[in-house]
Amino acid sequence: MRNNMFIHINISLKTMKNLYLPLLLVVLLASASLNAQVPFYFDPQAVSATVNIGQTATVHSVLRNATEQPVEFSFPGYVTKGQGGPDDYGYTWIDSDEEGGPNYEWNEIAETGVPVEGLSDDNVVGPFEMAFNFPFYGQSKNHFWINSNGCISFNEAVMPFFNGPIPTNNDNNDFIAWFWDDLTMDPAISRVYYKNYEDRTIVEFWRIPHFPGSESTISAQVIMMSNGTIVVRYKQISETFETTNGTVGIQSSDAEMGLQVNYNAEYLHSQMALRYDLNRNFITAVSPASGVLQPGQQETIWVTYDATGYTTGAYEQELQCVTNLGELPSLYLHNVMHVVNPNLGGFMGHVTDAGTGNPIAEARVQVGDHQVFTNASGFYELPLELGSYNVTFSRPGYQTRVIEDTTAVAGFSELNVALSGFYLLAGRVYAGENPIETGFAYNYKMHEGNVVDIFAEMVGQEGWYEFSGMSAAQYIVKAEPSPNSQYYGDYLPTYYGDVLHWEEATVINLTQGTDNKHIHLVPVSNAPLGPGSISGSINSGDRSADVPIILRAADQGTVTMTTSAANGTYAFNGLPYGTYELFAEIPGKATIPQTIVLSEANPSVSGVDMLIMDGEIVFLGMPETGLFASGPAIFPNPASDQLNVAFNLNKPTTLRFVVSDLSGRVLMASERQLFGQQNVEINTHDLAKGVYLLSCEAQGERVVQTFMKK
């Protein structure tokens, strides 16, 4: 065996559990159903872009209408009517007149709220305590003041009676302008209340007139949510109330940062709601933001990403598209913005399951002391200084993988990795129609055609074998009855695929757990006794005894097996005349079965000798061939500076001569066009003292002989 081959033996009797396969089928069917394409859809359904800090990028997808009717579509938050933003901090606004805007719902607190006293013309009262920390432009607010001129502020400054645009760019800052103008309080009709809830604070303004007071009033509520969302509800605005002279918006403590909804223009009306959101959404524009698609038409949707105010990392946003289709009121385009710093390096990419291709969440990506974890989409981003690194990917239930000497260039280098999981490989072993009661199973892990690992298990109850914790790879499985089995001697060691020969075995490409790799043992089938015999030997540097030698006769349907003696010899006696195939069976060793014909003229064949090499088993000489009339014979043996090869060819051919060592390493090779009686000289002067193989190959036939160099 090769030096990199390890044997793990863990003999145990285990009961099979078959529940996971039906569950897997259910999941797959459900997934197929969910992935069925609807007739109005994005193509592709997900887009992404890498954007430098502070820069913008544009991506696109195609919106297709495969229905038989015109479809109206729009993107809430990106149609110009009734919405706006973001400002430099990320606040946006949308009103109840817009698709996706807030619903108008008035929550009366006059009987349950706290009355606000002391408000008059051009003054401020407070502070009033909130039940939570209210986030406002990155600052935590837990007190507020109420200004008589249509504002709630987070300082005690009096708002002036003359309104202005937002951002104010002056000393008036840190406020919510629900209607900033010269308002006043009419003691006969005007009231203000506030009420704290666990997750919100409501401030109600009831029938507030313009200065100096009139029957034309405005009634509104300002709701400050614990998550930073602000909702303003306008219950009733008198028809004669002048709405075209006022400011609506929010202003941060920074005089240059704020979000204006309206300034001295016709906008507000009764039973209207307005909402401010801090989504920090990176999508700032969609074009077209609305439209109509006729049957069979398509439209390219352009989406703008803005990385202003974002740090390096991956950001996701679902872009909603609403339609007039009853069965599909909305659909979504998934967006990912990868923000990078062009002056820094690092790695980014996806970690997936090698078997299924599905994303792996919570996988650790590590370089030295720097580490991050993948998100639900399997995406990670690991910022580093420019340089070369060994990057380690790991997660419980998967094999750790190290990508060595990987260079992080400016920006982020893409490094996608698939991790192999640990899977179950199992099946049953049958003798005829019956599962064997005891036996052995061997599992050979393959890589590029070579055996790199061997596992062994007992065949347990009802013929089950089980190899757990297997990585995603290619495997060849072999089973045989144990000596105390009732089937021992009647059935032969058999590979998955129900064959005896290693090179005929079915390779299992394991990418998920399986328990249906059943093996049906090949039965011993002896032919009637006859006068023939076949004998020979098998040898290697360290193994000659107990090598399985298999003899099968295709024309008679018989197969039998013996093992080599301590000195490597073997023999099959009492054989009837016929054509046989003979080969030695060692897992991982390639060999071409030798065809041997027994007849009345040639009842016994001896000297069918084999040599075990690193990767194959070769026959030394051929008892019968259609190519060579005689030979090849080699002399002198041992050789000194020259080896002669004498033979007689039946027909013209290109003959290849190969000299190799016992490991199969080729030392010299040559080809010659030859016919008839020949004597070929091979220069052996440069060979070191030892034993070598000479292979003569042509037209699919191969004769191998050993010689010594003295």
Image: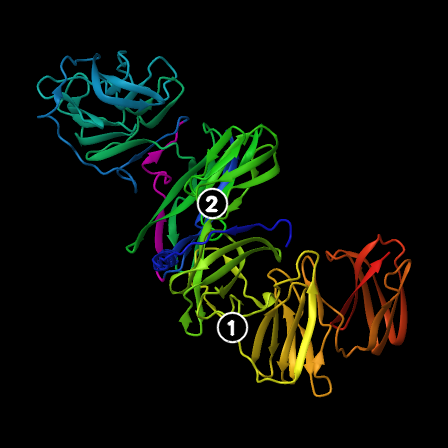
How many numbered badges does the structure rendering display?
2
Going from the N terminus, do you reach mark 2 or mark 1 first?
2
Residue 378 seen in the current view: yes
Q: Reply above or below: 485 against 358.
A: below
> Measuring 89% from the left and 76% from the top, which residue is drawn there?
677
Decide if residue 185 is on the left or right side of residue 643: left
Q: Verify whether residue 69 appears in magenta.
A: yes
As drawn, the label of residue 398 is 2
Q: Amino acid at mark 1?
A: Val
Farthest bottom residue?
Answer: 600
Q: Amino acid at mark 2?
A: Tyr
Q: Nearer the viewer, residue 564 or 393?
A: 564
Q: Position of residue 446 (x, y in %)?
A: 58, 56
Crowding near the residue tagged with mark 1, few <14, some 14–19, many ≥20 C-alpha atoms within 10 Å:
many
Q: Is label 1 in a helix, a strand or a loop?
A: loop
Q: Is label 2 in a helix, a strand or a loop?
A: loop
Q: Reply above or below: 254 against 499.
A: above
Alpha carbon separation for disc pair 2 and 1: 36 Å
Q: Quadrant of the C terminus?
A: bottom right
Residue bounds of the magenta highlight? 68-87
Q: Nearer the viewer, residue 35 or 455?
A: 455
Q: Which residue is mark 1?
A: 522
> Measuring 51% from the left and 59% from the top, which residue is drawn there?
442
Q: Verify whether residue 676 appears in magenta.
A: no
Residue 340 seen in the current view: no
Which quarter of the figure has residue 169? top left
Give the main secondary structure, helix, strand or loop, of the magenta stretch.
loop
